Image (cartoon, rainbow, N blue to C red):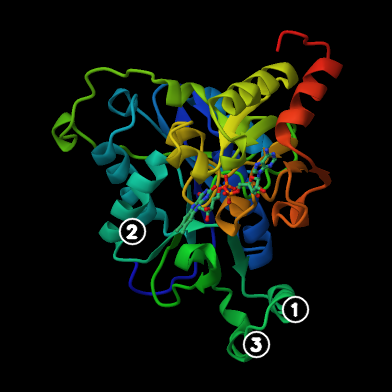
């Protein structure tokens, strides 16, 4: 397969699980896969591919979040992620069932798996997509109202139902849309935090298909000796409900400590801009933006962050953005819901006091 466009119109998502728990991004791309499959038409189903050992308990959750079919590979050789093992299972399954689209979260594992699978299947892959569309009249109308793109070709080929994969390019200053018209499946990795999960419906059930596992120990060339959890694993920015982010405007170490105290007081997770990483105040794992993590918390506090486009792409989908910046013209204020034009070192201690933490 993979060299010709086939009839099967199903959308597959890789249901990444770690230690028996589905990742957030797996449910996000399942929601997006559901939306795409409904746009493709009645003949299209959204399917999750679930791999591991003792993972059957996750099937109901995948159905509840929209899956019509769950393909499952349950085997002791698949207990932990290995590039060789998982690549073989997914490639074999794609060859057998021939989906139209396959999506992965752009996680460490997704970024490792997707290119190998695409190469094995001789098809294309768009990395780090932030928007996916099917070529429909809705999409063409969106382009006409929101962009200056020429839509003539799209209108001529509206029946092709090809996947339009959009991602930031050239330092985030330009969005590009990529298609894969001649090969199947159409494959993309999708940034965590940018797609919406479908509303959970525990009553929704679907079909389970057990994959034939043609895998032996010899197929897996690496052996996992030990897993050591570092502080990076503990920080879960992508899942945080409240994020307190600081930029170079924190000024010095005392500003960094103040931000940490603030996060502790409001129950938030500390994050930062790239400038704050470059100043040595934070580890890269705290960084938000194009080259960092994408987040969608309920509240995002931006303290002493100017709001460069590369930072915005990582946090602009937050429910509520509260910006504190001494410069009234800072770009962050263009996307903030609440704008506090003031020295961060004056505002934050006041908020901490008002919330009853006098230990500053
Ligand atoms: P600055 O732009 O220096 O802004 C500091 C702000 O603090 C200013 O607005 C100032 O008014 C304010 N301020 C100063 N003192 C105070 C005070 N006492 N109280 C309140 N406010 C104060 N950046 C990212 O963040 N994430 C990325 O993923 C990322 N990827 C990039 C990728 C590429 C290819 C490139 C070229 C750049 C990338 N950048 C990224 C860098 C980005 O362009 C900006 O340089 C960076 O985001 C600026 O960080 P900042 O807002 O902390 O610093």
Residue 15, position in %: x, y? 50, 39
Quadrant of the rendered structure where residue 109 is? top left
Residue 200 visible in image: no
The crowd level at tag 2 (other Cα within 10 Å; few <14, some 14-19, many 20+) is many
> Which sits in the foreground, 34 or 21?
21
Name the side, left or right, on which 51 lies relative to 256: left
Secondary structure at numbered mark 3: helix
For the N terminus, give its image quadrant: bottom left
Name the side, left or right, on which 182 lies relative to 245: left
The crowd level at tag 1 (other Cα within 10 Å; few <14, some 14-19, many 20+) is few
Residue at 38%, 72% (x, y): give it: 183
Q: CA distance from mark 2 to mark 1?
A: 31 Å
Residue 9 visible in image: yes
Disc number placed over residue 153 in the picture, else none: none
Number of labelled discs?
3
Residue 31, position in %: x, y? 65, 47
Q: CA distance from mark 3 to mark 1?
A: 10 Å
* Residue indicated by mark 3: 155
Residue 295, position in %: x, y? 61, 41
* Residue indicated by mark 2: 118
The crowd level at tag 3 (other Cα within 10 Å; few <14, some 14-19, many 20+) is few
Q: CA distance from mark 2 to mark 3?
A: 28 Å
Name the side, left or right, on which 333 lies relative to 175: right
């Amino acid at each position: 397969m993979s060299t010709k466009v086939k009839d099967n119109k199903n959308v597959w998502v890789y249901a990444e699980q770690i230690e028996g728990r589905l990742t957030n991004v797996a449910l996000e791309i399942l929601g997006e896969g559901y939306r795409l499959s409904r746009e493709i038409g009645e003949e299209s189903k959204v399917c999750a591919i679930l791999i591991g050992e003792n993972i059957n308990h996750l099937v109901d959750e995948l159905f509840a979040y929209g899956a019509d079919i769950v393909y499952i590979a349950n085997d002791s050789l698949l207990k932990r992620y290995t590039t060789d093992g998982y690549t073989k299972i997914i490639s074999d399954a794609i060859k057998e069932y021939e989906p139209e689209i396959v999506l992965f979260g752009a996680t460490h594992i997704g970024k490792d798996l997707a290119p190998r699978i695409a190469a094995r299947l001789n098809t294309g892959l768009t990395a780090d997509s932030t928007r996916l569309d099917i070529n429909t009249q809705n999409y063409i109308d969106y382009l006409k109202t929101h962009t200056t793109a020429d839509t003539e070709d799209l209108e001529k080929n509206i029946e092709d139902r090809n996947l339009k994969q959009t991602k930031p390019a050239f330092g985030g200053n330009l969005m590009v849309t990529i298609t894969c018209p001649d090969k199947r499946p159409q494959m993309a990795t999708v940034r965590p935090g940018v797609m919406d999960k479908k509303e959970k419906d525990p009553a929704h059930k679907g079909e389970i298909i057990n994959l034939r596992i043609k895998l032996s120990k010899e197929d897996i060339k690496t052996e996992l000796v030990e897993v050591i959890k570092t502080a990076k694993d503990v920080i879960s920015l992508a899942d945080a409900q409240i994020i307190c982010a600081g930029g170079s405007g924190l000024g010095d170490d005392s500003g960094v400590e103040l931000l940490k105290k603030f996060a502790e007081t409001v129950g938030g997770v500390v994050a930062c801009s790239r400038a704050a990483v470059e100043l040595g105040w934070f580890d890269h794992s705290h960084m938000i933006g194009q080259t960092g993590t994408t987040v969608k918390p309920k509240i995002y506090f931006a303290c002493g962050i100017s709001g460069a486009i590369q930072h915005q792409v990582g946090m602009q989908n937050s429910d509520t953005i509260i910006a504190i910046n001494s410069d009234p013209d800072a770009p962050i204020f263009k996307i903030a819901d609440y704008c506090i034009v003031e020295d961060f070192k004056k505002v934050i201690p006041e908020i901490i006091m008002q919330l009853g933490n006098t230990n500053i």
